[in-house]
Each structure stands twice: as structure tokens, then as C-alpha cells.
Image: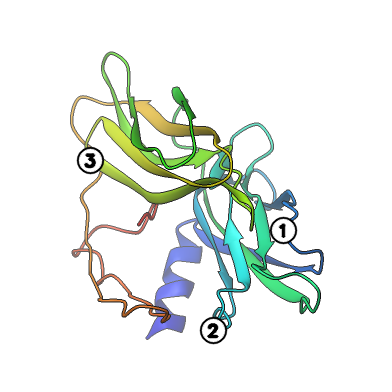
Amino acid sequence: ADASKAKAAAKKGYSFTSKTFTISQPNDGTRFTVSCPGKSEPLGGGMTTGAPDTDGEAIYPHSYERLGRQSGFHISPILYDPSPGNTQARQVKLTVLCGPKYAKVTPPHTTLDMGEDEKRPAVVRCPGKRVLIGGGYQRTNFTNQGGILATSNHMTNSKTWTVDGLGLGKFGGQMTAIGYCVRSKKPLLSTVQATTPIPPRSFASVTTPSCPKGRRVAFGGF
């Protein structure tokens, strides 16, 4: 069923493109990009990697960002290790959803300066008669010493995208919320969502239900 859906999407000009990277240096952010083929343009994107160790060592994202001019998707992941010295190299796969050109995209930004132990939302709103096709964030900087962690990244209504940040450890930093907006007389997105509990010091995953009939995935969030 998944294969037939992928073939049907490809016939309409939509496809997923992925690229895998290896990270070996602990607590050092790296910029990675995956590009759309030909003249196709990016919608949403994401990353997959292995489950964390019991102490939390794993790859985590510092950013989720559509790249319009470069026709791709960008994530700056970090190999977080709370006790460096025996860090294991890990792989991360970036994936972007590509499709035909759809509209001029306006990307308003909202940037916060945040201190240690501070918790605040960064809210970005589409201007004028524009509505969201998605959103993302950039500039978070947490390591094993502290910094800013994004704890949510999601649409709050048809014109507003919200990113919640949390200051950790010994220092703060910046966090930027991004909205990707196009001109439209009506909202373009509807959301499907699912929730799962995560026990202390545990790992869990959750998958949204399928999009309603006649709609396709464009962006994701958490």
C-alpha cells in the first residue's frame, strides 16, 4: 500500500529525497542539507536516527528549515553526549518532500534571546493575506553544558507557527521561529496528530494518522 501511494504521488510530481550522514564528534553542531531533484521545490522535511542510549547520547536537531533558494531542507544536528570520552559515531538520515512549483513563499522570522533556565514561545505570523504551508526553527544551541532546546515546533492556526524553547544548564542563546507563507483566500492546512506518553529516562515514538482523503502531507511538527 505504501509503495502504491508513493508511485501515485510521484506521478503527480511529488517525491521524497533522502541523504544519510555520519556524525562522530560529541556536542558539536553540524550543518546538513538534502536537495530536491531537477526543478522540484521543497515542502517539509525531517530526520531519522537511532534511539538514544540510556544516558541520552544520540543525535538531536538544532534546526528544521526549508531552503527555498537552494531547493532543499536543512537540519543542523548535534551528537549530544552528556559524558564525552567514549562517544559512538552515529548516522542520521535527512528527508525532504519535493513537488512542483506552487507559489511564492514568504518566510517571516521571530527571534528570541533566551537565558539559562528560561522557557518562552517564539511565535511567527504570516503577513497580510498569506497563510501557512509550514514552519520550522533555527539557532538553538544546546550541548552537554547548556543552551537552548526546542520543545515544540508546530502550527497553532492557519497563519501562526509556534516554537517553544527551554534554557538548559550554564548558558542561554537564541531561538528563531520560521513561518512559510503563501498568498491564499482560504487556509491551506489542516492537522492530524497523535500523542504518546514517555516514561522518565525512556524513549518513545509516535506516528500521526493518515491525512484525510484528498489531502497529502506537506509539513510535520511536534
Q: Nearer the viewer, mark 3 or mark 1?
A: 1
Q: Position of residue 209 (x, y in %)?
A: 24, 72
Q: Earlier in the sequence, mark 3 or mark 1?
A: 1
Circle 2: residue type:
Thr
Label 1 Cα crowd, 10 Å radius (few <14 / some 14-19 / many 20+): many
How many marks overall? 3
Label 3 Cα crowd, 10 Å radius (few <14 / some 14-19 / many 20+): some
Residue 156: image tag:
3
The residue pinned by badge 1 equals: 27
Q: Quadrant of the N terminus?
A: bottom left
Residue placed most toward the observer, 52 or 1: 52
Circle 1: residue type:
Asn
Q: Who's the residue at 28% across and 43% down the image?
A: 155
Q: Is residue 110 above or below residue 12?
A: above
The residue pinned by badge 2 equals: 54
Q: Position of residue 178 (x, y in %)?
A: 45, 32
